[in-house]
Image (cartoon, rainbow, N blue to C red):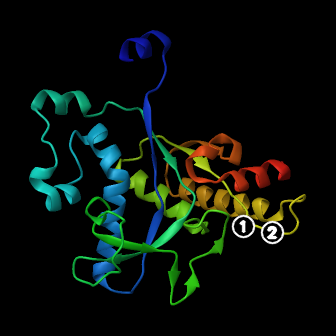
């Protein structure tokens, strides 16, 4: 790949899918849970390729469970990408599960920063619902996740490689698609704020249902979206 890059003058990057997270409660432990989740979700992918090792937040909790890179491997990995790609759709609340009791579930918290995530606080959704259960319309999350990535990786070029909206079942005004228009207006405005704060964003790509229906949606959802198109 590096040989082709030198020959063709291209750029090499990698993409991670990540929500943004906000503390469920106004306590320090939930703020820490947010930081862990971001490190376990985004940092797990990007840190080795930028800094040559897994995030210190992961090393702290997993120690010997994470492989150690040799000096040669570290030098090979460090600085090996030219840009970062982010697939971002939504924001969730995060609750600390180290010092607090959390609902039991099969969400594999040991690889999710020992945190519990939810789209509701006191029965109130964090944003308007969409056609995907864990996705809510939370434009401010776009600004926050881009700002986080930009600061953690020292203004490395960023591409938003996926962002888009799937309407809930039986939503009116499908022909005019008002909700989708409002979604992108909100998220692009948030992205613009992150750029004005210094993030080096080079591109933004809209996701539609036909880009990857086999990943998260059922046949009925795909059929409904095709009819809308």
> Most extreme residue toward the front, as rendered?
219
Q: Residues within 10 Å of mark 1 (few under 14, many from 20)?
A: some
Query: In the image, which disc is placed on residue 171?
Result: 2
Left or right of residue 72, residue 26 in this image: right
- Eyeballing the image, is 96 above or below 220? below
Q: Nearer the viewer, residue 182 or 218?
A: 218
Question: Which residue is painted at 64% across and 60% down in the image?
Answer: 187
* Residue at (18, 33) in percent of width and height: 74
Comparing 102 with 150, the one in front is 102
Residue 79, label in figure? none
Which of the 4 image quarters holds residue 125? Answer: bottom right
Residue 12, compared with residue 168, is above or below; it is above
Distance from label 2 to label 1 (Cα)?
6 Å
Closer to us: 143 or 87: 87
Q: Secondary structure at mark 2?
A: loop
In the image, what residue occupies the spot 33% across and 77% down?
Answer: 104
Locate residue 85, reporting x and y percent: 48, 42
Residue 183, horizontal then vertical, whole percent: 71, 62
Instruction: Inspect this view and state whether residue 208 appears.
Output: no
Question: Which residue matches tag 1?
Answer: 168
* Residue 75 visible (yes or no): yes
Percent x, y for residue 188?
A: 66, 56
* Left or right of 207, for residue 103: left
Residue contact at pointers 2 and 1, CB within 8 angstroms:
yes
């Amino acid at each position: 790949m590096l040989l082709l890059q030198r020959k063709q003058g291209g750029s090499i990057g990698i993409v991670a899918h990540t929500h943004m997270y906000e503390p469920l409660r106004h306590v320090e432990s939930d703020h820490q849970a947010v930081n862990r989740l971001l490190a376990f979700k985004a940092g797990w992918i990007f840190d080795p390729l930028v800094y040559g090792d897994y995030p210190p937040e992961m090393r702290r909790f997993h120690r010997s469970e994470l492989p150690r890179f040799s000096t040669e491997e570290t030098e090979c990995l460090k600085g090996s990408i030219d840009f970062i790609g982010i697939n971002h759709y939504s924001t969730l609340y995060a609750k600390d599960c180290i010092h607090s009791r959390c609902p039991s579930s099969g969400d594999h918290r040991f690889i999710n920063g020992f945190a519990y995530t939810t789209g509701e606080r006191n029965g109130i959704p964090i944003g308007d619902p969409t056609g995907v259960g864990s996705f809510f319309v939370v434009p401010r999350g776009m600004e926050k996740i881009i700002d986080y990535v930009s600061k953690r990786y020292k203004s490395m070029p960023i591409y938003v490689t996926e962002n888009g909206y799937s309407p809930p079942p039986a939503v009116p005004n499908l022909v005019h698609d008002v909700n989708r228009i409002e979604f992108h207006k909100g998220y692009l405005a948030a992205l613009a704020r992150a750029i004005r704060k210094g993030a080096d964003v080079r591109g933004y790509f809209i996701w539609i249902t036909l880009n990857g229906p086999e990943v998260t949606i059922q046949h009925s959802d795909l059929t409904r979206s095709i009819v809308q198109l």
